[in-house]
Image (cartoon, coloured by chain):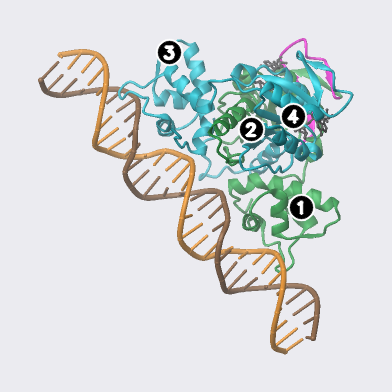
Chain colours: A green, B cyan, C orange, D brown
Amino acid sequence: MAREIPDATVARLPIYRRSLVELASTGAEMVSSAALADLAGVNAAKVRKDLSYLGTYGVRGVGYDVKFLLRQIGDALGLDIETPVVIVGMGNLGQALAHYGGFSSRGFPIVALVDASDAKVGEVVDGITISHIDDLAAIVDEHAIAVGIIATPAEAAQAVADALVAAGVRSILSFAPSVLHVPETVPLRKVDLATELQILGYYQQRESPAEGGNTDKSA
Amino acid sequence: MAREIPDATVARLPIYRRSLVELASTGAEMVSSAALADLAGVNAAKVRKDLSYLGTYGVRGVGYDVKFLLRQIGDALGLDIETPVVIVGMGNLGQALAHYGGFSSRGFPIVALVDASDAKVGEVVDGITISHIDDLAAIVDEHAIAVGIIATPAEAAQAVADALVAAGVRSILSFAPSVLHVPETVPLRKVDLATELQILGYYQQRESPAEGGNTDKSA
DNA sequence: TACCGCTTGTGCACCGGCGCACAAGCGCAT
DNA sequence: ATGCGCTTGTGCGCCGGTGCACAAGCGGTA
Ligand SMILES: NC(=O)c1ccc[n+]([C@@H]2O[C@H](COP(=O)([O-])OP(=O)(O)OC[C@H]3O[C@@H](n4cnc5c(N)ncnc54)[C@H](O)[C@@H]3O)[C@@H](O)[C@H]2O)c1
Ligand SMILES: NC(=O)c1ccc[n+]([C@@H]2O[C@H](COP(=O)([O-])OP(=O)(O)OC[C@H]3O[C@@H](n4cnc5c(N)ncnc54)[C@H](O)[C@@H]3O)[C@@H](O)[C@H]2O)c1
């Protein structure tokens, strides 16, 4: 890759993309930074600076070509090709994720489901049969799986992360409320709902505004 | 009062708390910033600076009292009192959230469930009967609900957010992939899983991790 | 052609966060 | 009492992110 895109910008690109998809569906062909900023809920100057990292795609006095911009952002995020995903841990959360169509439609088809419980293995969820965690490496290899989603209890999360890395998964998204250690080469992001609530708790009792700090986290 | 705690610190307090709970369960009475930093996956100096915003609770040459620190963090986050939560939208995700015990055990009991579909209203999930969205205001009032979780489709999210605010909810956590506008006084946090995957996609496709930049990774 | 209105691209100054590094301070051993 | 080892609390320089403000540049118009 040629260009270095700042972390903060990368975190916003999916938001711009979502806004552009919406715009495109209304038939709009061009969009100004101000209009896009409004849709994405950010500052117009930030939109322009963010987009400038992708290249000089705007036209002064006119704006940006919606479809073209959509393709450029897609390319930057690597959405030009589908990225197969495996979900590990088919409990409450895993089941909900498996049923959700929003991943496939955004280029991240769920191609395999894995669990450690014999009670779950063999069960069919949303057309996919749950496999045993011991077969993870073979499954990842077979489907060329690039992303692993961890939806197991916190105690099992590190072991699952290790297994995913060993199996050749390239990046990981974890829902387990625990600290995970993975090699530098494996991007890791985590979503901890209880933590989010506790953060809200602080601001709520302080009765202060602030909505920031959502799009940060590690690379 | 009114000690000002930086956003970045507030976001880490729940992590420290989790680590301390774990430590306490092992019988440890004191902990050094280095040990806590290791558990929380952050820098030791950062731990000390973060904790210093709460007060001067450490003892030089010794460390921090685990139980005392736990209580201080709990107080700062407002966890000394329970914060009742309502979930709006009982589809895939809403059901999973309702079944999850991790919220109640962390001071955020789910006391009400709401949906707009007549097919869902009346159904009992985890001991709670699903109510109609039209009754939201009464329900929020009755249970003194402070937090609303939005788990509806994106199209309905803004309307639901407005209804929650009107009903008197004090802060909102949204899972809908859309930009929401709420009054400054209502803290809002968003969790967008598809966005997380797209961010991972960017870092994943850039093969060379390079040498600069990427610190962290674990947390 | 010359001009005008509009929008981009970016220089710049500011701010919050980060982490190194060190003095201050505590407890224990002698 | 004195000294030593360990850990806290924080000053300080650095860096990435933010948004204002403006020059550059495009399309349309007369
Ligand atoms: N359910 C939610 O709404 C929710 C909300 C926030 C966080 N979480 C977190 O998400 C994770 C999953 O939550 P849940 O409610 O689905 O839990 P769950 O107990 O319903 O499901 C966990 C699943 O993981 C499987 N599992 C356990 N060890 C495994 C291993 N080593 N390899 C593969 N699979 C294994 C279990 O068999 C089970 O099916 C937890 O860490 C939880 O804290 C869940
Ligand atoms: N399921 C997942 O794993 C998942 C993952 C990522 C994001 N999300 C997001 O979470 C949200 C919910 O996802 P889901 O899979 O549960 O969807 P779903 O369609 O299964 O459930 C949505 C529920 O919301 C209810 N609803 C619709 N409009 C409403 C209104 N105005 N007031 C109250 N209730 C209303 C519907 O009756 C339905 O029960 C969506 O925005 C989705 O994009 C879900």
Rendered-image quarter of ligand 1: top right
Q: Residue furthest right?
A: B119
The reply to whether callout 2 and callout 1 are in contact (CB within 8 Å) is no
At label 3, the amino acid type is Ala
Residue behind mark 2: B170
Query: Where does the N terminus of chain B fall, quadrant-wise?
Result: top left
Query: What residue is shown with label 4?
Result: B137
Task: State the residue position of label 1.
Answer: A70
Q: Nearer the viewer, mark 3 or mark 4?
A: 4
Is residue A77 in the magenta section?
A: no
- What residue span does the magenta drawing correspond to? A107-126
Q: Which mark is residue B18?
A: none
Q: Position of residue B159 (x, y in %)?
A: 78, 39
Chain letter for mark 1: A
Q: For label 3, count other residues whose C-alpha is less than 10 Å away and answer few (under 14), some (14-19) or many (20+).
A: few
Secondary structure at numbered mark 2: loop
Residue type highlighted by circle 4 = Ala
Dot 2 falls on which chain? B
Identify the disc placed on residue B28.
Answer: 3
Q: Is residue B144 visible?
A: yes
User: Distance between the Cα atoms at labels 3 and 2?
Assistant: 36 Å
